[in-house]
Amino acid sequence: MRLFTTKAGLLCYLERHRQNREVALVPTMGSLHVGHLSLIERARQENAIVIVSIFVNPLQFGPTEDFQQYPRQLDKDLQLCKQVGVDVIFAPSTEEMLPPSQSNDNTQVIPPTKMISGLCARSRTTHFQGVATIVTKLLNLVKPQRAYFGQKDAQQLAIIQRLVTDLDCGVEIVACPIVREDSGLALSSRNQYLTESQKSQAPLIYRALQQAQKVFQAGDRNSANLIEVVNSELALAKDIQVEYVELVDPTTMMPLAQVDNVGLLAIAARLGSTRLIDNLLLRYRKPIVAIDGPAGAGKSTVTRLIAKALGLMYLDTGAMYRAVTWRVMQAGIELKDEPAIAELVSQSKISLTTDDTNGSAVRVWLDGEEVTQAIRSPEVTANVSAIAAQPAVRRELVKQQQSWGSQGGIVAEGRDIGTHVFPDAELKIFLTASVQERARRRQQDLEQQGFQNVSLAELERDIQQRDFKDSTRTFAPLRKATDAIEINTDGLSITQVTEKIVGLHHQQL
């Protein structure tokens, strides 16, 4: 593990080590706890190089806030980072990040006014401007493929997601779940300021959110009613001083009168001088079932049957990538000509329809032309991974997929559905099988389609190569989501796999 306190050292390291490797950034203000470590561990699983920044940002503290008292424990933080496999710590001084010549007149990044008008911004008027400025500087310095943030700071998370979209930063913002103490209290560096009496009352904040969630799940989606439930619970604690309880859109931070799709129920409260925040997402939608796994594991067939059994839409993402691959080949574009492919994809319209004669069958249309059968040829199969690995292709198709999934009620399969496309899916499955079993299945499929004399050994080599490409590509690689349930389909029939997943759906949802 390397420690750099200057931008020059960090940039030199990245120039020498980045090459084509995936880089992750975990921005922190230090005083690391288990919540931070969960972000780092997620980044470690998904990237080749993990960089943790430790910088107590003066721009995000108001005149009366605890900048000087904010806990600083660099030596302990370094030990924790080393234990979880961090590659680089970037711990610059204030002078390094905000040179004296700029300290009173530096360029600021100002988020959309409506996003910084409510919730925490009412009492911390320049806070998010300061956060956005330093996060932008860090993203520009590191240029990571992914940056990791916790859901606890939900307003900050939404602002950063908006920032990278509006400024075309080209980084994936990964939102990670809130980590809690056994009592339910959300982990925070400020929890150490609580007295024993305050520490015993603080868990009521989360319990109040949970009570509102129960009311919501019982069918009440009215904002005023849900907020009243929270306030009634919080009133039971003598030392909790409520700053706000609000129900807002988690993307725009605008207040909601009721939850039509998803709402963020957020709290800020003080116990003595310690300010705590917490939140819960309230979703009103049919569930999303995300099924990932390597090629040939049986995802497509199983997903169709599950969609039919559960009465959900089958979103055949693999067919979308096949359709794009077919279009590229038809246009005579070289597979390595990514700019030409990006332009072609951005101008193409893919539609999926259900065959009325077979509720589980999907027909694929590209610019008004049906390509259902054409996209299943061996030539398309051999080239689809190369096309799917291109960031421009995936960005365009993921936007379409997420649009379809915004209302829920779908079953989707692919390589990164649970990790990248629908990270908030209610049920995530990772289907896998041995290379030999997948090759045998592929051979049978091709023979049924009229392709004879296909070598089993050649299919095994193709599958191994495809696994390697899918799992090592820079953008959205094949990985098992941390909360996915793995099912090895060797020796299992399609019916057995389908019944197992349908059973999991009924158990969990």
Image (spheres, grey):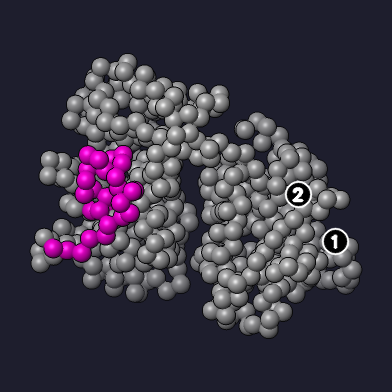
Residue holding disc 1: 444
Task: Please check the rendered image and state whether residue 202 is part of the magenta-colored stretch, yes or no.
Answer: no
- Residue 86 visible in the current orientation: no
- Determine if residue 235 is in view: yes
Query: What range is drawn magenta here?
Result: 105-131
Q: What residue sits right under mark 2 in the picture?
A: 304
Whole-percent x and y of residue 379? Answer: 75, 74
Q: Is residue 505 left or right of residue 3?
A: right
Q: Quadrant of residue 445?
A: bottom right
Q: Amino acid at mark 1?
A: Gln
The residue under the point 44% across, 24% down is: 225
Judge by depth and name the residue closer to the eye, 20 or 258: 258
* Figure check: 454 above or below 260: below
Mark 2, other Cα within 10 Å: few <14 / some 14–19 / many ≥20: many
Q: Nearer the viewer, mark 2 or mark 1?
A: 2
Q: Residue at x 18, y 30 (%)?
A: 273
Q: Secondary structure at mark 1?
A: helix
At a point 55% along the width and 36% down the height, the residue shown is 284
**Residue 129 forms part of the magenta stretch:** yes
Tell me residue 55's x, y (percent).
Answer: 23, 54
In the picture as drawn, the residue positioned furthest to the front comes out as 257
Left-right relation of 32 to 46:
left
Q: Percent position (x, y) of residue 403?
A: 57, 53
